[in-house]
Amino acid sequence: MVGDLGTMQEYLVMANFATFIGMGASIPLILRAKLRFRSKEIMVFSLAVTALLSFVIGTTNSPELIIASSFLMGFLKMLMLMEFILPLMFILTPDGKRGKFYSVFYPFSIVTGNISGYYFAKLAYETTWQYPHLLTAGLCLLLIMISLLFQHNQRFARKMPLFQIDWLSVVFFAGTFLFMSYFLSFGKTLNWFDARNIRISFWGSLISFVLLTLRQLQLKRSYISFGIFTKSNVKSGLIMLLFMGVFLGSSSLQNTFTVGILGYDIVTNASLNLMMIPGVILAGVIAYFWFKNEWPIKMFIFSGFAAFFLNSVMMYFMMVNEFNYEGWLMPMFFKGYGLSAIYIAVWFYILDKLELEPMLQAIGLVLVFRSFVATAVFSSFFSWLQYQFQWESVNNLAVYLDGNLMPSQVALSGYKNIQLNAILAANKKIYGLICIAAIGMMIYVLQHHFGKLRFSRFRWTKARFNGALRERKTKLLRETLEKIEDAAGAPL
């Protein structure tokens, strides 16, 4: 797609991020759209616009138009997804336990995403990159026919008008993260703050977020609620999602290794994600029984980070010039288990004991933080770090070579090997740093309380002190009464 469009890869990376930003922007509006429109109306309209946008992406040559279409598709995708999630939640978990639902929904989402990604990559490889988007448009039209024929026409609740929706806040929200996505996507290519566009995107993101925050203070019905971010479980959950971004950001290192060193094509590279499926399913099964028995989630979250740690250790030792394809089975298994386990458990922990309205108002920020900010920050950081380590490795290897002592053709032929070994050395350094950071993450999970009371000794000591104080007061009162009785009884 990059070669056919003749554009930079960073535009497509930003388009991928724009999809998640659109999903986060639509979440605060879901409940109001649900109360205003019927399910059939939401599905038909969203599918029709998605089909149109897919056709636009498949026929355009403008990367800016692809980014805008991806944002709108993400916005509508979340509305359609809620029409799928709500009935499925009541079917799978009629008892209302969210943990059991997450243990089914997230593995299903990850597995279907990996399978569809593989077959779309295969279709694009065998035809052209436009065909998957045109196929998506056709599938949306088919789903419209199914929705018109079989979906009910009843309302979710009493019809309520669309009022007090602050569209300016939606613009500020989208502007904040779209500017940020440009900053993180093009930062390395444009040499960060040396480029005028990078400086504009940085200040644009900062100013948009400040305006968004100030705007919420003036509204009677705010678009985004920051109240839940004062809760301990939300803050700790965001920290763990940031930890997960370290491992997800390392996917860029894996792609550099598979494509640049091993020479995999896009189909073979996409097939590696299929090896994650057994780990994803295993994490879902374990999570289902874990939440069914209502065990504490600390060790389950720890197992997810431990799986990511094992994946990083294996990737550290896999940085060689030649590698067997079957050797990817165990690393990708652990990666799939860690991804599914942390998605399920941390999302459950963040949303635990939150009210519906403030949760919907703030979950958009949490979703964008999980799917975009955490991943994009570390992906961009690792890309910059790899470039620095690669040049350092080239300088170290160049010490042992002297072009004056060998023919020019021999010196030039060795340049490729120097570059490949420099990439391997840089990747190995970064994976080593990730392994060290993973140890700190696991220590954080082990020491975190996860809502459990840690100061029971203090509470027991306080109760014992209060009991002794009550006994002393009772004794003094009894002695005082005896003295009064003695004094009153003397005249008698």
Image (cartoon, rainbow, N blue to C red):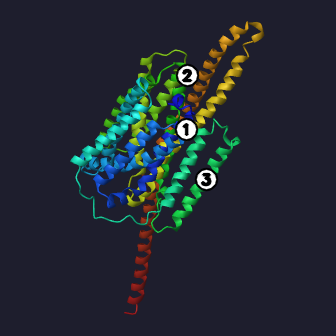
Q: Up-down: is 486 above or below 432?
A: below
Q: Nearer the viewer, residue 89 or 441?
A: 89
Element at label 1: helix
Q: Which residue is mark 2?
A: 260
> Is residue 453 in view from this perspective?
no
Q: CA distance from mark 1 to mark 3?
A: 21 Å
Going from N to C along the chain, the mark reached first, 1 or 2, is: 1
Residue at image coords 39%, 45%: 50
Residue at image coords 66%, 40%: 192
Q: Which residue is mark 1?
A: 11
* Numbered circles on residues, count: 3
Q: Up-down: is 218 above or below 124?
A: below
Q: Nearer the viewer, residue 308 or 68?
A: 68
Going from N to C along the chain, the mark reached first, 1 or 3, is: 1
Whether residues under marks 1 and 2 lie with C-beta atoms below 8 angstroms apart, the answer is no
Q: Up-down: is 226 above or below 257?
A: below
What percent of the width, then of the height, locates residue 392?
Answer: 69, 25
The three-letter amino acid code for the residue at tag 1 is Tyr
The three-letter amino acid code for the residue at tag 2 is Gly
Q: Identify the disc placed on residue 206.
A: 3
